[in-house]
């Protein structure tokens, strides 16, 4: 639960910054840093990969993420991909209402600064992602949790992974149809 609450704070650019004292800002940044370190990809940590990753996340009317795209790359594919995965799975968002009080879809931008403790500051600026070098967009689907009528769970995968799962689900049915055809002929 701590990770979810803190990751909500990591999303820097989506909501106008509220006035906070330097002590509050320092505490927030320390909590964010501790959470990011808990989720820092082990291989990237060993390889010394660090950097800023910018992203855009789309939310439905219930403030549930539907997809995430990296907009600015750290220069390290694993960190870029991990950013969207981390935000999609752990971040919690609040619904936004229009002037009439109706919940609306929203688009949020944010930045995560992957920094290794004790390492020299990363001096490489994030690179704007183009269509050619963009990591695959993560797409989320919200499904009713097994065994409950009120709980939902989010599953996030790339379009390619969703297609692969769909194909795997169809295989047994195709085999049943082939066997039924063979028995009838």
Image (cartoon, rainbow, N blue to C red):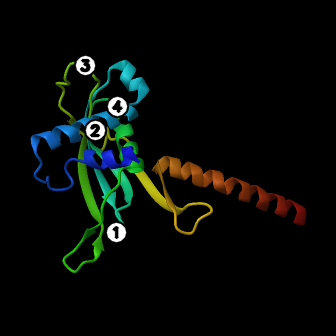
Q: Residue at x 59, y 65 (%)?
A: 148
Residue that carries the numbered disc 2 in the rendered image = 31
- Residue 8 is left or right of residue 143, and the answer is left
Q: CA distance from mark 3 to mark 1?
A: 41 Å
Q: Residue at x 10, y 40 (%)?
A: 22
Residue that carries the numbered disc 4 in the rendered image = 37
Q: Quick one: label 4 or label 1, which is nearer the N terminus?
A: 4
Residue that carries the numbered disc 3 in the rendered image = 119
Q: Residue furthest front?
A: 23
Looking at the rendered structure, the secondary structure element under dot 3 is: loop
Question: Residue 144: image x %, image y %?
Answer: 54, 64
Q: CA distance from mark 4 to mark 3?
A: 13 Å
Residue 102 drawn above or below residue 92: below
Q: Quick one: label 4 or label 3, which is nearer the N terminus?
A: 4
- Residue 158 is left or right of residue 105, and the answer is right
Residue that carries the numbered disc 1 in the rendered image = 61
How packed is label 1: few (under 14 Cα within 10 Å), some, or many (20 or more)?
A: some
């Amino acid at each position: 639960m701590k990770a979810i609450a803190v990751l909500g704070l990591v999303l820097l650019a989506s909501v106008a910054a509220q006035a906070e004292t330097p002590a509050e800002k320092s505490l927030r940044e320390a909590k964010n840093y501790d959470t990011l370190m808990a989720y820092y990809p082990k291989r990237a940590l060993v390889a010394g990969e660090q950097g800023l990753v910018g992203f855009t996340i789309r939310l439905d009317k219930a403030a549930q993420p539907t997809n995430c795209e990296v907009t600015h790359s750290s220069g390290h594919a694993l960190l870029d991909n991990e950013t969207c995965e981390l935000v999609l799975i752990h971040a919690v968002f609040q619904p936004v209402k229009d002037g009439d009080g109706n919940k609306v879809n929203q688009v949020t931008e944010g930045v995560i600064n992957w920094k290794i403790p004790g390492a020299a500051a990363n001096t490489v600026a994030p690179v704007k992602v183009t269509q050619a070098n963009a990591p695959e967009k993560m797409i989320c689907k919200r499904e009713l949790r097994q065994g409950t009528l009120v709980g939902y769970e989010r599953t996030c995968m790339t379009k390619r992974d969703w297609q692969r799962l769909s194909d795997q689900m169809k295989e047994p049915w195709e085999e049943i149809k082939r066997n039924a055809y063979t028995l009838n002929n």
